[in-house]
Amino acid sequence: MVTVQHHCDISFDSSSTWLDALKTAEINGDSEIFFPKGVYHFYSGTKQKHFFISNNDESVKQIVFYLGGKKDLKICGDDAKFIFHGRLLPFVLEKSRNISISGISIDFASPFHFETELLDTDGKSSLLRVPGKWHLENGMLVVFDDGLDVINGKMIFTPYRKDNGEFTDTCGYHVQNKDFICEKENELLRVPVGMKTTHPNLFVRHQARHTPAILIDRSEDTVLENITVHHAEGMAVVGQNSRNICLDHLRVVPPENRDLSVTDDAIHLSECEGRIEIRNCVFLETIDDAINVHGMYRRLKKAGNTMLMEACHFQQFGLWDGKPGDILELVKAETLQPYAQIRCKEFLPGTRQLYCLELEDPLPPEYVDGDIVRIMRSAEMEVVISNNVMSNNMFRGILLSGAKSGLIENNKIHSPGNGIYISGDANYWYESGPVRKLEICGNTFDHCAYLDPNTVPINIDPIVLKKVPGFYYHGTVSVHDNIFRTKDTDLVLKAHSAAELNFYNNSLVTDSGTGTEPRLNADCGKVVTANV
């Protein structure tokens, strides 16, 4: 085991000691690197590399812990606190195998959001107290003053309750970064939008999604255990094109001096394979979902004698991991109905948006240029989400699609929108695909959908634009032995396009005392109920 030297000086850049420890471990053949208890500050990356990151933004990343091609390595700490300064990407696991990280926490010295207070509004403009480092240049807010600073040209103001962390608006205010006015020596900011909120506190997300806390890319057998992520620019953990991921006792929670943890999803796993386990975790106060696990649809096209596979959403560009012999499933976008499978002989990178294919099998006669396709390796994914706590994740708790099997058990979910959302979409996000067998049991849905009356604790809602009689997108879904706590409604589940839905032994508690049994609204092939 190699022990990293701890320096008490806050100005010391621990990036150098980490790199020295990694080199020592490689020379000596050690498989474990240990960080003693203490606070470690990181000011610079040890690796610079361009990355495409699923549902995040592409750019050149300054990476501190770069684990490219590493195998059989443990990075562990004794409550080691990592503080990152600037736009750094803390961890990247790229084409790695059997990597374990544990016993650390991740935070940033300067967060990628503001927590503000609305002082006054006249209907046309609003005055806010904005703590933190910022200044104005020609009416534009500047925070980090680098090439990625407020790159999308807008900021999102999201109202919330400071006393309990609940959100109070489904979308907040999207404000262009212009025509701002400083008042009282940069402490106050006047925004050219009239804001109305029931509570005066607003999160201001002023950056995009460039530096998640941990990226797992094309890796295998990854374990993240006893880790706390307090903040990141984007998501806490992103996994893509990877096999076998275990997240155990992972906490994505705000630090004591802030109200928000990460500015987007806590966990986002895209087109992964094998067994995915998320257990004993806590995900609090995020401006997007707690857990999102999905496959990916792409569009198939002909260009002369060349077949092209096209990524359809800009945050899915560059995510190519096709392999010779892969089976591709062809799907009609309007119906989401698969109609053929073909084998691919070769994948050749084209552009960030296009992949060139050589097919081993001929295209079926039903094929129409522009049909949807998915790589079937990720369709064999098995997902277990167990014993987790999720609260105030805008907008939903758990999203799951594109798995052979899913088990969602013994979780506690308090979400402003759907507690669990089982979808499938080939028209906007292109997140695939069906779940063949899903069990939802032993969960407590505590006032889910508290902000959006059009949502429910459990929503099985594939985006089917044109229904085909007798076709059901999802397979068998069993919902049993759950507790639903609601304000005044007994409708707890909406579902359509599942071949079989079993609903039994669920209980309902309403604040108003209305309703005696939980109710569902289902349009599925077969519906079996025992307590409705």
Image: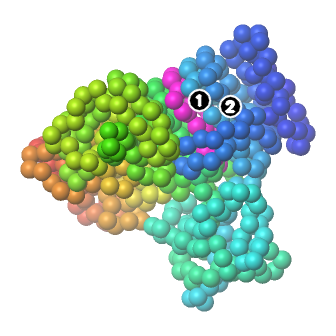
Residue projecting furthest to the left: 469
Please tell me which residue lies in front, 48 or 154.
Answer: 48
Q: Which image quarter holds the N terminus?
A: top right
What residue do we see at 54% from left, 53% from top? Answer: 264
Give me the disc on residue 66: 2
Q: Position of residue 154 (x, y in %)?
A: 60, 68
Name the N-terminal-most of marks 1 and 2: 2
Cβ–Cβ under 8 Å for marks 1 and 2: yes
- Answer with the quarter of the image where residue 146 lies: bottom right
Q: Where is residue 403 in the image (x, y as percent from the top left)?
A: 33, 35
Does residue 296 appear to the left or right of 498 in the view shown?
A: right
- Give the main secondary structure, helix, strand or loop, of the magenta stretch: strand
Does residue 188 appear to the left or right of 202 in the view shown?
A: right
Q: Is-magenta flag for residue 486?
A: no
What residue do we see at 51% from left, 23% from top? Answer: 220
Q: What stretch is highlighted in magenta?
A: 211-231
Query: What amino acid is found at the position of numbered circle 2 in the picture?
Result: Tyr
Does residue 268 appear to the left or right of 84 in the view shown?
A: left
Q: Is residue 460 above or below residue 386?
A: below
Write down the residue under mark 1: 94
Q: Is-magenta flag for residue 224?
A: yes
Q: Is residue 279 visible?
A: no
Please tell me which residue lies in front, 31 or 332.
Answer: 332
Q: Residues within 10 Å of mark 2 (few under 14, many from 20)?
A: many
Q: In this view, does 108 lie above or below 438?
A: below
